[in-house]
């Protein structure tokens, strides 16, 4: 294998600019877990020597990695890995996906009851009587909260058992599937919550007024009926959004 790592990055990178090929080598090291989240990359001088290229080429490679959300560069200090080595599958919710990302996440159910829709930003066709489930997700190791989720499911016959028995396997998704409610499609919105409300701050153990990440998810069945609307407030230090297009 030559210094630009053709064997590591694949034949598709042969003929690409040097900066792209170097970024490919480093990306493979990050994605494989060889370089973990928070670890420092080699210095620019070390990368120049490793790949026998100019400093400008190395900097272009680092810009590529930064653009993909894999590293962050701190002026005068160096570049650090911001990707945890795993891809988060958010089909069952962003914070639930952390459980498969190498970090043990606990769940505390704060409320399961029947009531009127109380989320002001809910779509019009989700208004009315609903099953209300509020959950707090937290890191088991530290007890620090990572998200507060408020799920609202249009009320259906047979939901009374949920109020009595709780969630199946602790999962709202499993509970709804038992009742024949399966997600076929949906929408998700990501925004910044400029100021964390006092009520939510108390639950999350944070300061009121802090900026947070706000995710809203609306899922539907194959017949277009609403299955669930969930509003999640998440720790911005732990969650981010990276889209490749």
Image (cartoon, grey):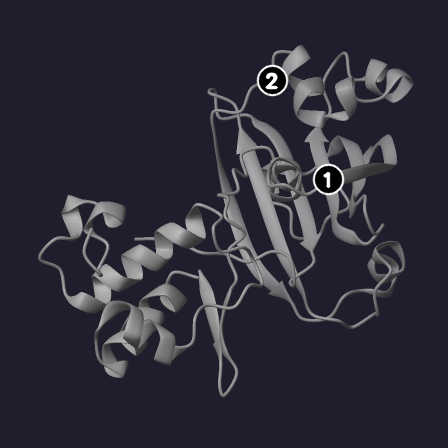
Is label 1 in a helix, a strand or a loop?
Answer: loop
Q: Earlier in the sequence, mark 1 or mark 2?
A: 1
Binning the other alpha carbons within 10 Å of mark 1 as few (below 14), some (14 to 19) or many (20 upward) gives few
Residue for badge 2: 181
- Please state the horizontal and vertical placement of residue 94, each as a whole percent of the image: 60, 43
Quick one: SS at disc 2?
loop
Residue 136 in picture, x, y percent from top left: 80, 44
Residue in view at x 14 percent, y 65 percent: 17
Q: Which residue is mark 1?
A: 104
Distance from the alpha carbon under mark 1 to that under mark 2: 28 Å
Tag 1 near tag 2, CB within 8 Å = no
Query: Which of 98 and 229 lies nearest the eye of the viewer?
Result: 98
Q: Quadrant of residue 144?
A: bottom right
Residue name at image x 69 percent, y 58 percent: 235
Q: Is residue 116 visible?
A: no
Q: Compared with residue 178, is residue 88 higher up or lower down, i.e. above or below?
A: below
Q: Residue at x 64, y 38 (%)?
A: 229
For this view, does 191 lie left or right of residue 24?
Answer: right
- Residue drawn where x is 71% and y is 26% of the image: 172
For the residue carrying disc 2, how many other residues have a C-alpha within 10 Å: few (<14), some (14-19), or many (20+)? some
Q: Is residue 163 above or below residue 76?
A: above
Residue 223 vertical position relative to residue 230 in the rendered view, above or below: above
């Amino acid at each position: 294998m030559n210094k630009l790592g053709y064997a590591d990055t694949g034949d598709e990178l042969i003929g690409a600019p040097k900066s792209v090929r170097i970024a490919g080598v480093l990306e493979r090291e990050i994605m494989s877990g060889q370089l973990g989240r928070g670890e420092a990359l080699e210095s620019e001088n070390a990368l120049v020597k490793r790949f026998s290229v100019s400093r400008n080429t190395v900097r272009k490679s680092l810009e590529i990695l930064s653009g993909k959300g894999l590293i962050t560069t701190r002026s005068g200090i160096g570049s650090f890995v911001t990707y945890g080595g795993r891809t988060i599958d958010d089909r069952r919710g962003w914070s639930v996906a952390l459980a498969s990302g190498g970090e043990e996440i606990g769940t505390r159910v704060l409320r399961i009851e029947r009531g009127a829709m109380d989320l002001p930003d809910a779509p019009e066709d989700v208004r009315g009587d609903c099953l209300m489930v509020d959950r707090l997700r937290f890191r088991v190791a530290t007890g620090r909260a990572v998200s507060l989720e408020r799920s609202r499911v249009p009320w259906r016959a047979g939901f009374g058992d949920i109020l009595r028995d709780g969630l199946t396997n602790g999962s709202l998704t499993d509970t709804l599937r038992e009742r024949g409610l399966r997600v076929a499609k949906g929408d998700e919105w990501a925004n910044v919550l400029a100021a964390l409300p006092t009520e939510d701050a108390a639950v999350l153990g944070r300061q009121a007024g802090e900026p947070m990440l706000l995710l809203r998810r609306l899922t539907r069945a194959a017949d277009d009926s609403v299955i669930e609307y969930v509003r999640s407030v998440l720790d911005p230090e732990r969650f981010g959004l990276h889209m490749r297009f």
